Image (cartoon, rainbow, N blue to C red):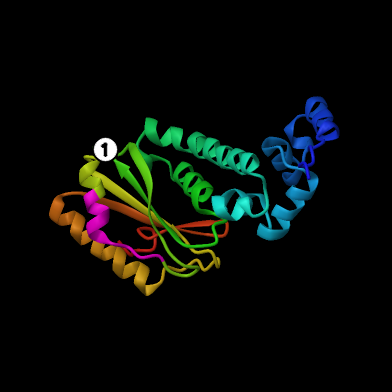
């Protein structure tokens, strides 16, 4: 059976006449990714919201969307990441809390599993690279200080900022979070690589370990 062809004529007419704000989240996703209304509804029913759809893994998306649409969704997400990352590459990462928080929230919010993200910085604290350093379960992600520092040395980074998410929305770092962060800080001290902060993304909040007095 041939795949149904998405009909976005009505949504596109509103988009042309009134701009992007005329489309709700689901309509915007359907038009951008070339999804049918049924596919868009299935994605929102499965994941719950636009951030959660965009945070879903490629495998999860392919269960509900055609390969081309899943690839377009991945592109939409990466374009948003690039826009958020751009200011961090042009000026010191820690010079603007709101910029860092927006970037980390955009990358980590909505994920169904915990992920550990590393921001590797140069001597002027500008972003060299951001990488996912580990993926765990719904309530834990392993942190390996040796691997964090190995990657920092490979990138010739002078400093590191860590971040991870709590899919359940719990806004308080766990004992394991605190202890593993201290181990990374100690490993960095031996190599003269600073660990500026560790951020926790939970629901709409971004929490700083340093701000909590944990670093």
SS assignment at label 1: loop
Q: Tell me the chief SS of the magenta region.
A: helix
Instruction: Please state the total of marks drawn on the protein image.
Output: 1
Of all residues, the one furthest to the bottom in this rendering is: 175
Q: Which residue is drawn at 38% across and 44% down?
A: 130
Q: Residue at x 17, y 55 (%)?
A: 189
Q: Residues within 10 Å of mark 1 (few under 14, many from 20)?
A: some
Q: Which residue is drawn at 30% across and 66% down?
A: 180
Q: Residue at x 37, y 60 (%)?
A: 209
* Residue bearing mark 1: 122
Q: In this view, does 133 lie to the left or right of 19?
A: left
Q: Where is residue 187 in the image (x, y as percent from the top left)?
A: 19, 59
The stretch in magenta equals 141-150
Of all residues, the one furthest to the front in this rendering is: 1
Q: Where is residue 70 in the image (x, y as percent from the top left)?
A: 61, 44
Q: Is residue 43 left or right of residue 206?
A: right
Q: Where is residue 81 in the image (x, y as percent from the top left)?
A: 50, 40
- Quadrant of image for the N terminus: top right
Of all residues, the one furthest to the left in this rendering is: 190
Q: Is residue 157 above or below residue 211?
A: above
């Amino acid at each position: 059976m041939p795949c149904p062809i998405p009909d976005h004529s009505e949504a596109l007419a509103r988009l042309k006449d009134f701009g992007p704000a005329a489309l709700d989240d689901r309509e915007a996703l359907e038009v951008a990714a070339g999804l049918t209304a049924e596919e868009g509804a299935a994605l929102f029913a499965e994941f719950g919201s636009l951030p959660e759809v965009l945070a879903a893994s490629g495998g999860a998306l392919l269960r509900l969307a055609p390969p081309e649409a899943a690839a377009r969704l991945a592109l939409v997400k990466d374009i948003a990441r690039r826009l958020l990352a751009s200011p961090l590459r042009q000026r010191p990462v820690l010079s603007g809390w709101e910029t860092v928080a927006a970037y980390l929230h955009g990358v980590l919010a909505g994920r169904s599993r915990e992920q550990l993200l590393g921001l590797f910085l140069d001597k002027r604290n500008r972003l060299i690279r951001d990488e996912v350093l580990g993926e765990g379960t719904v309530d834990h992600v392993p942190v390996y200080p040796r691997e964090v520092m190995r990657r920092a040395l490979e990138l010739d980074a002078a400093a590191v900022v860590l971040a991870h998410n709590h899919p359940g929305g719990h806004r308080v770092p766990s004992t394991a979070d605190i202890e593993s962060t201290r181990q990374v800080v100690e490993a960095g001290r031996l190599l003269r690589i600073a660990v500026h902060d560790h951020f926790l993304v939970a629901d709409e909040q971004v929490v700083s370990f340093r701000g909590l007095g944990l670093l």
